[in-house]
Amino acid sequence: MAGTCNPQFQNKLKQDFSDLEVDVKGRIPFDELKKLYAQCDIGIIASLQEQASYVAIEMAMFGLPIVSTAVDGLDEIFTDEINALKVHTKFSPVFGLSVDVEMMAKQIARLIEDEKLRAVLSQNVRKLYEQELNLDLMIDRTISVYKEVVD
């Protein structure tokens, strides 16, 4: 797992899934992150909110088949069953917003079991990156926004 997560989550993960080996990498340099992306078979984004998801863009750049939560910031990037598999969130008055963990597990299992689905999602998300999310386009769009603000 690239990035940080709170110790309570790590402890709960170990407690609930003792047979699962999870290596929390913490913050790592981009060169190391690129190597990690190249080694991965699946990208998982279990966020409750995103504004400008560099993780989503990076995973798309590497053509990772993605399982993502259907939340603001990610919902606008991905199309369910086309370039990612989406997972719903749940709301509880007691616990607030959370990822539908059962649905997330089912979507991850689908990708593990279905090589063809992984290939299709990988190809489509890479195409999305090339057509909509590449650096040149992002720079042009950012400059356009600044120009509009100044004008």
Image: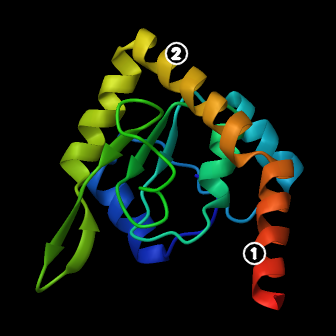
Instruction: Indicate whether 91 appears above or below 64.
Output: below
Question: Which residue of the protein is positioned furthest toward the top in this rendering?
Answer: 116
The residue located at (67%, 59%) in the rendering is: 54
Residue 132: image quadrant is top right
Question: Which residue of the protein is positioned furthest toward the front in this rendering?
Answer: 151
* Percent coordinates x, y for residue 99 in the rendering: 28, 61
Instruction: Indicate whether 2 appears above or below 107.
Output: below
The residue located at (83%, 47%) in the rendering is: 32
* Percent coordinates x, y for residue 84 in the rendering: 44, 36
* Percent coordinates x, y for residue 135 in the rendering: 83, 50
Which residue is the site of mark 1? 145
The residue located at (41%, 56%) in the rendering is: 75
- Please, what is the three-letter code of the amino acid marked with disc 2? Ala
Closer to the camera, 97 or 74? 74
Kind of element beneath mark 1:
helix
- Please, what is the three-letter code of the amino acid marked with disc 1? Val
Quadrant for the C terminus, please.
bottom right
Count neighbours of disc 2 (C-alpha within 10 A) and say few if under 14, some if 14 to 19, many if 20 or more.
some
Residue 93: image quadrant is bottom left
Horizontal arrangement in the rendering, residue 57 relative to residue 83 (left or right)? right
Which residue is the site of mark 2? 119
Closer to the camera, 88 or 15? 88
Count neighbours of disc 1 (C-alpha within 10 A) and say few if under 14, some if 14 to 19, many if 20 or more.
few
